[in-house]
Amino acid sequence: MSKTKYPVIIFEGIEASGKSTNINNFSKYLKQNNYKFIKIREPGGSKVSEKLRKLMLNKNSNLNAKTDLLLVMASRSENIDKILNKHYQKKIILIDRFTDSTIAYQHYGMGINLKTIKSLNSFVVGKFKPNLTFLCTANKKNMFKRLSSRSRTNRYDNFKFKFYDKVRIGFEKLSKNKANYVLLESDKSTQKENLNKIIKAFKKIIN
């Protein structure tokens, strides 16, 4: 992994895998240690992207897979233009989901052609590339336990397990044998252990 002063760090994973918890804990660490950083989520981020997020995650939105894909790409395009390019190499960038989520959900989960997704990702993202990705995992039992305890759920929290299983397998394939991927297992590790793992990986790439 190449070193950089301001890396782009992605947090990936299925619903209720500890993704938001891990990114929030790491954000606190960066703030406490006076690192310059920004944090955004996908879908969401810019003003337009947040509107697209509401549309995508609304339980009453009966969107087909192609529409889902194009809304994700539209959200990402707005973020690249309005937020990410502006801060690239000037601040540490944390993103809650990015291009691999699109492949995991829209290709492995929904069955959209992989070449189409890769082509759209390349078109939208251009030269903007992550330096480090954390993959958060949870087993079936814990995932559904956490989802059932949520006071508010969205459209993506209510798919059948078969869909989530396809997505999980997709993430595993995407992360396999990649040096810039670090696994964070919420079933086997505490929040503190996962934070220490994040910090250790972060220090390896920070210049």
Image: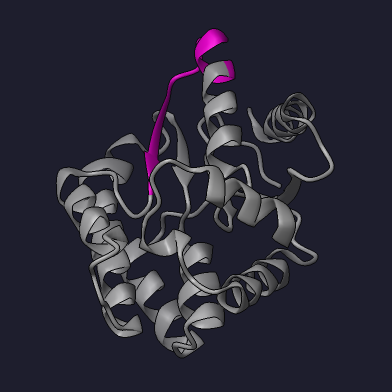
Q: Nearer the viewer, residue 176 or 194?
A: 194
**Whole-percent x, y for residue 86 in the image:** 27, 38
Residue 10 horizontal side relative to residue 207, left or right = left
Label total for image: 0
Task: Write the residue at 46% across / 56% down.
Answer: 98
Q: Nearer the viewer, residue 27 or 138?
A: 138
Residue 40 in magenta stretch: yes
Furthest residue in direction right, as rendered: 188
Task: Write the residue at 47% across / 38% down.
Answer: 94
Magenta stretch, residue numbers: 29-41
Q: Quadrant of residue 52?
A: bottom left
**Whole-percent x, y for residue 55 in the image:** 21, 61
Q: Which quadrant would the C terminus be assigned to in this image? A: top right
Task: Write the residue at 41% across / 59% down.
Answer: 127
**Whole-percent x, y for residue 163 in the image:** 56, 76
Q: Is residue 15 above or below residue 206?
A: below
Q: Nearer the viewer, residue 118 or 22?
A: 22
Q: Is residue 184 above or below residue 89?
A: below
Residue 203 horizontal side relative to residue 163, left or right = right
Task: Write the residue at 61% across / 78% down.
Answer: 162
Q: Is residue 189 above or below residue 115?
A: above
**Residue 131 appears in the picture as rendered:** no
**Residue 128 appears in the picture as rendered:** yes
Q: What colour-coding does the image apply?
A: one colour
Residue 74 in magenta stretch: no
**Whole-percent x, y for residue 41 in the image:** 39, 45
Q: Quadrant of residue 32?
A: top right
